[in-house]
Image (cartoon, rainbow, N blue to C red):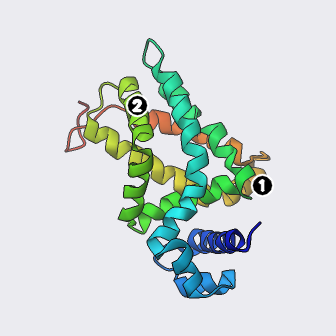
Amino acid sequence: MSSKVHTQQRILDAAQSLFAESGFNDTSLRQITTKAEVNLASVNYHFGSKKELIQAVLQRYLQVLMPRLDQEFDRLLASQKPNDLTQILSVFVKPLLDLNQLQRRGTRTFLQLLGRGYTDVQGHLRWFINQHYGRTLDKFVLLVQQSCPHLPQSEVFWRLHFSLGSIVFTMASSDALSEIAQADFNEAVDIEGVIRRLIPYLGAAIAAPVYSQDLKTVA
């Protein structure tokens, strides 16, 4: 590995660790350079800015994950009838789990970072993802709409973001949840088990009947 690539990797690894632990807003470039044992000029040279560094950290995962999801969405869209929502959500499982081969605890880390992008209000990150992977995301939304024709577009938006919040919280506390399951119910649950338990819940929540604004009647 060349010195240049090695330096980039050290910066990315340090940034990823700190971003996942403390968030994007509360992590300074000085903390990153200290952990990576490089100077600030190296970060500016390789990435240009903190925003571009954040994007590069996520891109390591996205460039592996999104093409695989795109293929799965194309396969489902080729079906002659709407797909079951649980089936649609299930195509995420293997590509997400395979991120553990990219980085240690890659699945958890990626979902934590993705969640940080929303909780830390990183608008540039949403722009970056839409710019590079907007077509893939549109295919997923289309599949959800086909599966749930009773949902208005605005309701799909809200429910997918509520689902993302559930995913991020679950991944952030997955170790604790696994320990509780073992201690209280004598169940050994790994990360795949956690994800597969989450899918039916998300499917039911996304497909639930639409309520009026006063939350009293079903539309």
Relative height, residue 75 to residue 161 (above, below): above
Please say whether residue 86 is visible from this viewpoint.
no
- The amino acid type found where label 1 is placed reads Ala
Q: Is residue 97 visible?
A: yes
Label 2 vs label 1, nearer the camera: 2
Which quadrant would the C terminus be assigned to in this image? top left
Q: Which residue is mark 2?
A: 144
Residue 17 in picture, x, y percent from top left: 64, 71
| Residue closest to the eye, 30 or 96 | 30
User: Gap between marks 2 and 1, in whole Å?
Assistant: 37 Å
Whole-percent x, y for residue 42 in the image:
59, 81
**Mark 2 vs mark 1: which is more N-terminal?**
2
Quarter of the image with the N terminus in it: bottom right
Relative height, residue 8 to residue 168 (above, below): below
Q: Residue at x 58, y 42 (%)?
A: 198
Residue matched to label 1: 183
Q: Amino acid at mark 2?
A: Val
Q: What element does badge 2 sit on?
A: helix
Q: Residue at x 55, y 85 (%)?
A: 41
State the image quarter where residue 108 is shown.
Answer: bottom right
Q: Nearer the viewer, residue 174 or 107?
A: 107
Dot 2 surroundings within 10 Å: few (below 14), some, or many (20 or more)?
Answer: many
